[in-house]
Amino acid sequence: MSSLKISLTGPVHVCSYRVLYGDTDAGGVVYNANYLRFFELARSSFMRQYVSSYKEIEEAGFILPVVESYLRYKAPARYDDLLTIKTSMQQISNFSWRFNHHVLLTASLKLLVKGFTVHACVDKAGKLAKLPSEYLARIAEVTSTPDS
């Protein structure tokens, strides 16, 4: 089974998350789709620190929906585990960005999951749009390109 390269480049944002009982499935491990929620938590925190809050971007008339996602599971997380989520951002174009994520078990720094989400910028009508220059300038400061 192949695995895509998902490296963390540029500024790396780090946040923590304690696994709740409701995050787990009948097998006692974090349900697979919940890692996308963890990615969202980390991505929102990254954006707030380096670019702008999603709320501010939405108030400016733009939405950044997920258009692609990928996860590679290496080992499970369990109830009450403390996770470290590391996130970086790559610019694909003036209309889309990729957030790379690594989810680690904080106690051992063991890599549990790696993955990414790709986001496009659309206006309130759902049409592809370019963010205003002040946002693009902030993004340019914290992103790498897929080739770097």
Image (cartoon, helix red, strand yellow):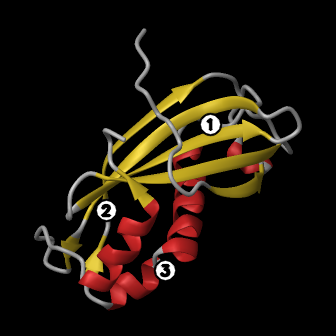
Mark toward the start of the polypeptide (3 vs 2): 3
| Residue 136 located left or right of residue 89 | left
Three-letter code, disc 3? Ser
Q: Of residues 107 and 10, which is closer to you in this image?
A: 10
| Residue 136 located left or right of residue 81 | left
For disc 3, the marked residue is 53
Q: Is residue 126 above or below residue 132?
A: above
> Of tags 1 and 3, which is closer to the observer?
3
Name the residue furthest bottom.
59
Q: Position of residue 142 (x, y in %)?
A: 46, 63
| Residue 129 located left or right of residue 89 | left
- Disc 3 to disc 2: CB gap under 8 Å: no
Q: Quadrant of residue 114?
A: top right
Q: Quadrant of the N terminus?
A: top left
Three-letter code, disc 1? Tyr
- Disc 1 to disc 2: CB gap under 8 Å: no
For disc 2, the marked residue is 65
> Of tags 3 and 2, which is closer to the observer?
3
For disc 1, the marked residue is 31
Three-letter code, disc 2? Pro
Please give the label number shown on residue 20.
none
Q: Position of residue 118 (x, y in %)?
A: 33, 50
Pointer 2: residues within 10 angstroms few (<14), some, or many (20+)?
A: some
